[in-house]
């Protein structure tokens, strides 16, 4: 009996030591387990529990170290061009592993001793954690962190170190709140039924996102979000003809960033499709048929 207990004790001991070794290899700063427990319990950042191996940096610490770190925006190029931290470079998480690895490794080569800090949109956005994880595990780059408070917290606190539509310091009154965005969002079924041939319907998905599927089967205008000249033309046309504008993307995420440019055009009434084109497939067929 004594021998069995001794074996169990030794096995448990070595399991604990092994776990500690794995943790020390993963953690950039070799933080204590107690520190991780504090991070995990922070309900304002739900991603910290899933990505507990990723070292995070606070807004205040990032600001104090601003000139001594490399800041990387992990979002799409469109989001980056709309609103970003002033000194940030853009390495989108959406890149394939080879391109992502090449760019991160090049950044490390240029800045061998600096922290690399990834950020995205905010508390519930997972891109900063995912980018930091890819940088460590795939690109084999160390001293990588996530600024998970995100671009909106940063801009509100330090508008002089942010840039909105090419302008800095940022006028924070021009930041679009979630409530102001939601005023322009319609449930997919309502969007489809209200968007008629007498309105202007814009499909702003990229070519590969469409893949032959069109919600309005030819009644919409096809415009990629980056084509601001064409977008401006149709907004101007809608205003002149007193028509409402209905805009949809792939999954209802990118239109929030398109809204910043739309507002500079002083448009008439406009609406986004909640969930984007993919939401069409969640609507029961009988509801799509008018009585």
Image: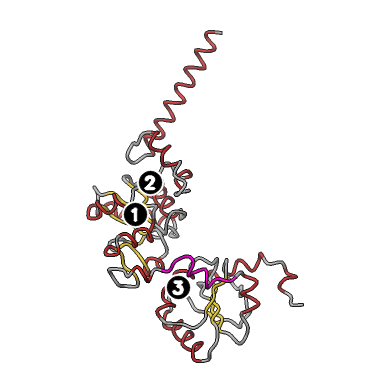
State the CA–CA distance, disc 3 to disc 1.
28 Å
Q: Which is more toward the observer, 278 or 63?
A: 63
x, y percent for residue 6? 49, 12
Do the residues under discs 1 and 2 have CB atoms within 8 angstroms?
no
* Helix, strand or loop at mark 3: helix
Using residue 247 as the reference point, say whether residue 21 is left or right of it: left
State the CA–CA distance, disc 2 to disc 3.
32 Å
Quarter of the image holding residue 122?
bottom left
Up-down: is 17 above or below 242? above
Within 10 angstroms of label 2, few (less than 14), some, or many (20 or more) residues?
A: many
Residue at image location 41% in from the left, 53% down from the top: 128
Within 10 angstroms of label 1, few (less than 14), some, or many (20 or more) residues?
A: many
In the image, the segment drawn in magenta is: 176-186
Q: How did the renderer colour the structure? A: secondary structure
x, y percent for residue 189? 65, 71
Do the residues under discs 3 and 1 have CB atoms within 8 angstroms?
no
Numbered tag placed on residue 148 in the rendering? none
* Helix, strand or loop at mark 2: helix
Numbered tag placed on residue 136 in the rendering? 2
Residue linked to disc 3: 258
State the CA–CA distance, disc 1 to disc 2.
10 Å
Up-down: is 110 above or below 176? above
Quadrant in which the N terminus appears: top right
Residue linked to disc 1: 104
x, y percent for residue 17? 42, 26
């Amino acid at each position: 009996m004594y021998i069995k207990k001794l074996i169990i004790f030794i096995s448990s001991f070595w399991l604990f030591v092994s776990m500690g070794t794995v943790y020390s290899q993963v953690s950039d700063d070799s933080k204590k387990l107690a520190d991780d427990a504090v991070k995990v319990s922070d309900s304002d950042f739900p991603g910290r529990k899933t990505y507990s191996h990723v070292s995070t940096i606070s807004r205040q610490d990032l600001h104090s170290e601003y000139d001594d770190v490399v800041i990387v925006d992990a979002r799409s190029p469109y989001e980056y061009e709309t609103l970003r931290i002033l000194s940030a470079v853009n390495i989108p998480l959406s890149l394939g592993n080879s391109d992502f690895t090449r760019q991160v490794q090049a950044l490390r080569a240029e800045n061998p001793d600096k922290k690399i800090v990834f950020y995205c949109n905010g508390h519930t956005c997972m891109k900063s954690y995912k980018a930091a994880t890819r940088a460590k595990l795939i690109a084999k780059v160390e001293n990588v962190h996530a600024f998970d408070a995100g671009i909106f917290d940063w801009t509100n606190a330090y508008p002089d170190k942010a840039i909105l539509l090419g302008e800095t310091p940022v006028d924070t009154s021009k930041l679009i709140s979630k409530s102001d965005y939601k005023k322009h969002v319609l449930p997919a079924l309502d969007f489809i039924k209200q968007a008629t041939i007498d309105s202007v319907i814009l499909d702003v998905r990229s070519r590969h996102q469409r893949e032959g599927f069109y919600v309005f089967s030819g009644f919409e205008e096809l415009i990629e979000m980056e084509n601001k000249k064409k977008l401006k033309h149709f907004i101007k046309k809608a205003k002149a003809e007193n028509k409402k504008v209905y805009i949809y993307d792939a999954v209802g995420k990118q239109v929030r960033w398109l809204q910043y440019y739309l507002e500079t055009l002083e448009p008439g009434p406009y609406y986004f499709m909640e969930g984007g084109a993919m939401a069409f497939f969640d609507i029961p067929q009988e509801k799509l048929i008018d009585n």
